Amino acid sequence: MIEDLKGFLSVYAENWHDWGPQIYEAIWVTIQLTIASFSLAVVLGLLLAVGKLSNIGLVRGFCTAYIEIARGVPALAVLFLLYFGLVPLGIVFDAFTAGAIGLGMSAAGYIAEVFRAGIQAIHKGQREAALAVGMTPMMTFRHIILPQAIRIILPPMLNMVILLLKDTSICSLISTDELMLRAKDLAMMSFLPMHLFLLAGAIYFCLSWPLSLITRKIENLMQRGRRQTFGG
Amino acid sequence: MTGPLLQVEELHKSFGDLEVLKGVDMTLDRGHKTAIIGPSGCGKSTMLRCINYMERPTQGHIHLDGELFGETQSDGAYKPMNEKGLARQRAHVGMVFQGFYLWPHLCARDNIGIGPMKVRGISKAQANELADAMLEKVHMSHKANEFPERLSGGQQQRVAIARALAQQPKLMLFDEPTSALDPELIGEVLNVIQELAEEGRSMVLVTHEIRFAREVADHVIFLHDGVIVEEGPPKQVIDNPQHERLRAFLRQIVEH
Amino acid sequence: MDAFFTKLMTLGGPLLLGAGTTVAITISALLVAVVLGLALALIRLLNIHPLNWLIATYVEIFRNTPVLAQVFIIYFSLPYLGVNINPFPAAVIGLGLNGGAMLTEVFRAGLNAIHFGQREAALSVGMTPWMSLRYIILPQTWRITLPPLGNYAIALLKDTAVVSAIAAPEIMFWARNLVTSTFETTFVYILAALLYFCLSFPLARLVDGFERRQRAWQ
Ligand SMILES: Nc1ncnc2c1ncn2[C@@H]1O[C@H](COP(=O)(O)OP(=O)(O)OP(=O)(O)O)[C@@H](O)[C@H]1O
Ligand SMILES: [Mg+2]
């Protein structure tokens, strides 16, 4: 048993000079992909959230439809459509761009709902602020509105980062050269799929777990704040 | 069966380092009613919850109707009873909680009927019949199909009492049944409890309603810091308290 | 117009077949995930030390790695241990294990949301712990967890797309095959996306309904 494990691990040691640099490079792509898609999702999500609350029926309708569709269609289908499906129309993205745009557009639907909840909190905060006589607008924003909005927005946002980080792996299926694709290629070349997929899994875990811990910490913190707000 | 209905011997209960009950004894004869009074945190609830083994005592023993409760004994050694045996014994003891704890997914009738149905295995029709009879006892027949969320606190507590009655218990335990109620709803619940008392049921009642205790109970226990400081007939304990602590406690209650 | 319909018929057929597989994978994996999640959440209630730790570890690992990696490990690595596995069961096991981790947390939150007095009241009328779980606690947990469960089902339905990577014959798999044989790239992928939407939209409406009813309860 111990011997088996030793043998299993020694494979990594033997191959690391070859795998190591490639894996590092791929991790970096995965991180860039996460950041790029998250940034796009935040910007697009904010626009959609504002649009969904708009007075103009057409804008509202479009944003509502977008959000529903984005939440109902798998990111992978969006990626395929962007990367392969638009080529006949003369629209060609490289794999990284298609990956970032596809994941971002897909996540934007979810982010929009998060922002909408936050915006509604601000509306409520303003009503309450009107009652809190003697506060300057700056003070009300700082002490009443902002805390409420952040409490609602921050935890799901962080969860979205984790979700996106994991979802970048599906970009391997449109040949974005990120961690999963590199692991798969190395697996095919070396005939060591178990080693490489476990390695990839472990790396994703090392990237995602700290984020999970931080998110949970913040969630707990917000909960505590909540109890203080309403507790006697 | 002769002998007392309930016997509590040398009851101790600790939560970690905190010793809440420090040796409490009591006996209750059939048809008698004992009220337990005392300041908040003195261990009244804990004592009541030890009686039906909702909490396992750290020391001491309970006998119900001559039978050792929550434990089995062989060769002088006591062993905790298994969950099945415990459930069978608990079925003889009705309990009414401060927080009602009606089950929100069941209507009033099913809240009452489900226990006998699952525990004693009676049919659904029999359970409904039983539930309706119990609802009538607590004057809640008109709300049989209502769900708990649509009932007032007083109504919920009356249904909870009916639920306990449906067990056809030998003993009823009440843990501050009116403390969570708005003042105007307390009366309806106390009325129901009084009617049960007049039927000759055996009960142990924890309450802050001193006047009610005086009227309904035939024995009053004043619990303080986990020990019984004073006990006796209500007229003696409440109208003529001996210990300074009890006097202070009663003064404070009256002021409220 | 006629050409459009012919195209729709020839391409839609295989995709619909794929949709059948997608639904089958979703339902099977959902079943695995619900049973696993509920069982593990209940075992955690018992608070047995090494088990607790094992379950928490399982949950953390599966929640912090991509489902694609999980499916790959099961599909490509089990043969390495001498176990040969087909794409369909590999997909169901991978997605099911992934969902089991998600739902363990969902059920745990649901169970913990129920006041301990509910259980005590059940014990006090003479129910055994098992009866109190069966007749009092679980029905209430169910009500609380229905919306997150529905949301999970939608996420799962969408996640099934990734098992095309191990050649499980679901929508995306058929779409890719059709593209290589017909070159109708745009049309096929739009159709595939549409198909997913048609499957998930009713579910989303259902979840909305649950959530609205839940708010009404509170
Ligand atoms: N499960 C528990 N774990 C730890 N401590 C407990 C537990 N239950 C009760 N206690 C403690 O035991 C003491 C007695 O509690 P108990 O509920 O019996 O008081 P009480 O006399 O019923 O008070 P009240 O009138 O407020 O209901 C309190 O200090 C309480 O904090
Ligand atoms: Mg109490």
Image (spheres, coloured by chain):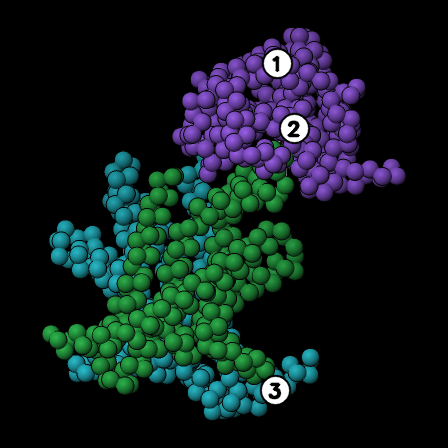
Q: From what the image shows, is residue A91 above or below residue C98?
A: below
Q: Secondary structure at mark 1?
A: loop
Side (left or right) of A6 relative to A163: right
Which of the two residues, B96 or C160, is positioned nearer the viewer here? Answer: C160
Disc 1 designates what residue?
B199
Disc 3 designates what residue?
A10
Kindly check if marks 3 and 1 are in contact, taking CB atoms under 8 A apart as contact. Answer: no
Marks 2/3: CA–CA distance: 66 Å
Which label is found at residue B28?
Answer: none
Same-chain check, marks 3 and 1: no
Residue at x-position 23% and y-position 80%: C185
The colour chain C appears in is: green
Same-chain check, marks 2 and 1: yes
Residue B86 in view (yes/no): yes
Q: How many marks?
A: 3
Kindly check if marks 2 and 3 are in contact, taking CB atoms under 8 A apart as contact. Answer: no
Marks 2/1: CA–CA distance: 17 Å
Residue type indicated by callout 1:
Glu
Q: Nearer the viewer, mark 3 or mark 1?
A: 1
Q: Which chain is purple?
A: B
Which of the two residues, B108 or B80, is positioned nearer the viewer here? Answer: B108
Which label is found at residue B93?
Answer: 2
Q: From what the image shows, is residue A177 above or below residue B105?
A: below
Residue at x-position 33% and y-position 69%: C19
Residue at x-position 59% and y-position 33%: B122
Residue at x-position 64% and y-position 86%: A7
